[in-house]
Amino acid sequence: MGHEIRQIATPADFAAVFDVSRETLERLATYESLLRRWQKVVNLVATSTLDAVWHRHFADSAQILRLAPHGARSWADLGSGAGFPGLVIAILLADAPSLRLRGEGMPPRVTLIESDSRKCAFLREVARETGVTVEILSTRIELPATQAKLDSPEVVSARALAPLDRLLGLAAPLFTPATVGVFLKGRDATAEIETAAKAWTFAVEMVPSITEATGRVVVIRDLQPKPKD
């Protein structure tokens, strides 16, 4: 069953929902401009979503920030693609001390992992043009060398990367008892959770998406593999 969603069509709508600064809106506007320019040569997002960037990509990504734990120092975004949700999160954290997961000082370290080198080039260009500090790893998540670089992030996120059972397999090497997974999912979230529970034990919360009537944000804690028979 669906739920009420917010229509976030413009920067003003975004600011009203997420209470962000003018600097954040300017950075996101730069992001949108670069996305439109690069989309002509690199397939970054579904072309049909370009005219709904603030809703389908920026707001969809931004909604997960409130579900991350306060006090976290590091964030890993798996399969970042065009930067959703990880690069949007980094932009939000850069300009808003009240949103930062650390109570003081610098914002948390945000690492984007993306195996497509062309998408990584786009991510680097957006980071450069917006002045946001992120770490971008052009590599595969499942490689031990990649996992070693991530140093047990306290938040792991992903959108449209893989079914939850496979996603948990990719994320599990990064998890400590304190790690929280925040994953954007669609109408099949409940079925994906049931399938994943055959191989994994975890605490789970499903939060309705504010941008998609059948969407859910799946929040995972205490992730452990089930013992093999």
Image: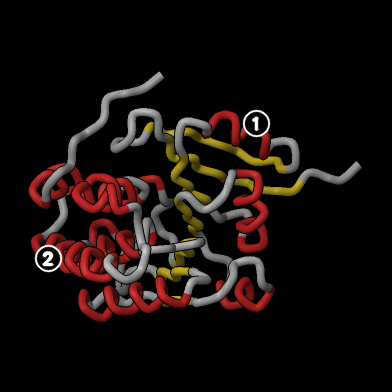
Q: Is residue 129 left or right of residue 203?
A: left
Left or right, 145 with respect to 89, comes to right
Residue 143 versus residue 79 in the image, above or below: below
Quadrant housing the C terminus: top right
Q: What residue type is labelled 1?
A: Glu
Q: In this view, does 114 lie above or below 67?
A: below
Residue depicted at 12% across the width and 65% down the height: 26
Expressed as whole percent of the image width and height from the top left, the position of residue 148 reads: 63, 76
* Scheme of colours in the image: secondary structure
SS at badge 1? helix
Structural distance between the alpha carbons of marks 1 and 2? 41 Å
Q: Tell me which amino acid carries mark 2.
A: Glu
Whether residue 96 is situated above or below residue 148 in the rendered picture: above
Residue located at (32% from left, 65% from top): 90
The mark that comes first in sequence, 1 or 2, is 2
Foreground of the two, 63 or 52: 52
Neighbours of disc 2 within 10 Å: few (<14), some (14-19), many (20+): few
Image coordinates for residue 120, horizontal then vertical, percent: 41, 75
- Residue that appears at 45% across and 51% down: 159
Residue holding disc 2 = 26
What mark, if any, has residue 95 been given in the picture? none
Secondary element at tag 2: helix
Q: Where in the figure is residue 92, as x and y percent of width and height?
A: 25, 60
Which residue occupies 38% across, 68% down?
Answer: 108
Give the x, y percent position of residue 97.
Answer: 23, 63
Q: Quadrant of residue 142?
A: bottom right
- What residue would you read off at disc 1? 194
